[in-house]
Amino acid sequence: MNKMKKITSMPLFLPIFCMLLVMAANIVYDISCGNFALNFFSISVRNGVLYGRLIDILNRGSEIAILAIGMTLVVSASAGTDISVGSVMALSASMCCMILAGYGNASVNELANPLLLGVLGGILIGCVCGAFNGFLVAYLSVQPMVATLILFSAARAIGLLLCNNLIVYVRVDSFKMFGGYLGFLPTPIVIAAVCIVIAMIVLKKTALGLYVQSVGINKKASRIAGLNSARFIFLCYVVCGLCAGIAGIVGASRISSADSNNIGLNYELDAILSVALGGNSLGGGKFRLAGSIIGAYTIQAITTTLYALGVSSDVAPVYKAIIVIIIVTVQAPPFKAYLARRSAKKALAKGGAAA
Amino acid sequence: MKKKINSNTLLLLITIALFLVMYAAGCIIYKDKGFTHLQTFLNIFINNSGLLCVAAGMTCVMLTGGIDISVGALIAMDCMFLSVGMERWEMNALVLCALVLIIGIVFGLVQGFCVAYLNIQPFIVTMAGMFFARGMTAVICTDQVSITKNEFFVKLANAKINIPFGAYTNRKGVLQIPFVRYPVMIALIVIIVIFLMLRYTKFGRSLYAVGGSETSASMMGLDVKKTKLKAYMLSSFVCSIGGICFCLNTMSGSVRQALGLEMDAISSAVIGGTLLTGGVGNVIGTLFGVMINGTISTLVKTNGKLLSSWSNIAVAALLCFFIVLQSVFAKLKDRNK
């Protein structure tokens, strides 16, 4: 019993537990279909690139993992969520493709501007959006969700304007590479890994992570202790925008076009969900980036599994919504208090019987 | 008796003035495109009758300091349920409408329970509700379904209520009598009922009290949790009425219907002077907020050359302006203390 409690109270218990659950579901599914039981884990090399369901999950989950980095910081520092990330992804993709194709062109086979300029433009517009959100939240003390609601609706519209209401195709191999393959590895995996490693190093090796947590736990106290709380919150939103920008470029490159209506659709939920699934409190304060990252890939695993089970992409949100509600309910203080009361009652009854 | 103008009524006055200026500007710029006719004004109501209901419900939730972003998806689910119910299952329209209202109440009950009794952030709960409802829409049916078979519903949707004044003859010499449709009447009744409820009933006043300060509300002996629960139930219920209005307007159901309607509802309420922190607001302001929303999209449509995304951007910019204004007022108030 005590051992059980020790395991469940481990910091990364929730995300790893969920991950194992999904894997178990996959194994059961494969067995019931008469496939090889470990089909889920098999990785092979086809046409010179890695192939397998696990690789697919890592590949498709890259955007969510990148978004989860920014979202974790935002949730931790401001106790709110940035719901504009999906739209900002679309805007960044539109910006990038608009620069690469030139304004008003619907489809190009040659770059109008250097690739680097397009990518930087996309990332920059992401940062600008993040700065806008951050300014509203940190300096005007607007509720985070409402502040980000502005860009949630406006960013897609601006993206459409940038692309002149068209879906801009950039059919150039060097641009396709970001969503394609780097050697035998899918590039998004590499990009996500680089982002994660950089974020980990910055948060672990500098005091930045500690500062963000302290701002999230108590804004006023940290300010009195000498931290510029507002600036940290602002920075967190900028980083979140930066992550959304990078994810947007990966997303655009994957389909080698900028479809402002569909890129990053519903990604904000996935990003928030991965933070919650990672065992981080949505009320801010302490955070574990590793948990969020595992959470992000778990969600992609759930999505991929749902698709494998034949659930259509329109219906998948139902299951995700149920998972969110279960997770936040388990985390909710009144629910925890209820469980504690119940176990106390049980212990009391046991004690009474022994006496 | 002279009423004191405080920052809250000032916000409402700014909204009304903004609406009048915007509409007057439209009348001057697009005079030759029929903007001055009474019908153009009535069309704003006809096009936004669903939004009016939703925004009224949203105002009640926002008064308690919460937010409900599930409304757009709930409307999509209602429309899909109504249209599939009439077309595929061939059920009675009134029975379906009653079912939709019951679904709304249950939906609100669950959301309200999570918010009030489990203390989960309203945004997270209603976002889960939004994805749940959107997904359920697809579970009911993934095609676009149009309502054509149900005679009663079609008749109701096409019925015109003529207005006795403001008639004019158009260029072809045909007399045009201005009209509204039934959803508009439903929406106006909803607005009036909620206005009276907020002003004169115990529940309405307790919404303001809870939004103002939960601690003092509970010290006054109000059941804060129950009030919040009721607010979310009311929002979802009114939203379902809005769903019926919306369905009468569009006469179809599809998975991507009413996408982003929650944003319009929230921005209407905020533009109408409802404070995001709760405790301050008025349904009349929300009415003007919806009308500003409608005027912007009418202006963009009348122009004809602008992309429709401009109306999205304009509404977002207005929302941003009012949020900043609110925060400045709040900061000034803090300083005065």
Image (cartoon, coloured by chain):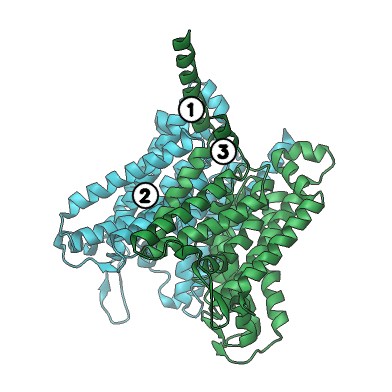
Chain colours: A green, B cyan
Q: How many marks?
A: 3
Q: Judging from the image, what secondary structure is the residue with disc 2 in?
A: helix
Task: Let me know if marks 3 and 1 both belong to one chain.
Answer: yes
Left or right, A195 with reference to A345: right
Q: Amino acid at mark 1?
A: Tyr
Q: Name the residue beneath numbered marker 1.
A: A338
Please report, as a chain letter, where disc 1 is located. A
Mark 2 or mark 3, whichever is nearer to me: 3
C-beta proximity under 8 Å, tags 2 and 3: no
Q: Name the residue beneath numbered marker 2.
A: B239
Mark positioned earlier in the residue sequence (3 or 1): 3
* Residue neighbourhood size for the residue with mark 2, other residues' Cα within 10 Å, grouped as few (<14), some (14–19), many (≥20): many
C-alpha gap between disc 1 and disc 2: 33 Å
Left or right, B79 with reference to A63: left
Q: Judging from the image, what secondary structure is the residue with disc 1 in?
A: helix
Residue A96 is situated, as x and y percent measured from the top left of the image, at 64, 77
Q: Name the residue beneath numbered marker 3.
A: A8
Q: Amino acid at mark 3?
A: Thr
Mark 1 or mark 2, whichever is nearer to me: 1
Residue A187 is situated, as x and y percent measured from the top left of the image, at 63, 74
Task: Let me know if marks 2 and 3 both belong to one chain.
Answer: no
Q: Specify the farthest residue to the top.
A: A355
Please report, as a chain letter, where disc 2 is located. B
* Residue neighbourhood size for the residue with mark 3, other residues' Cα within 10 Å, grouped as few (<14), some (14–19), many (≥20): few
Which of the two residues, B151 or B306, is positioned nearer the viewer here?
B151
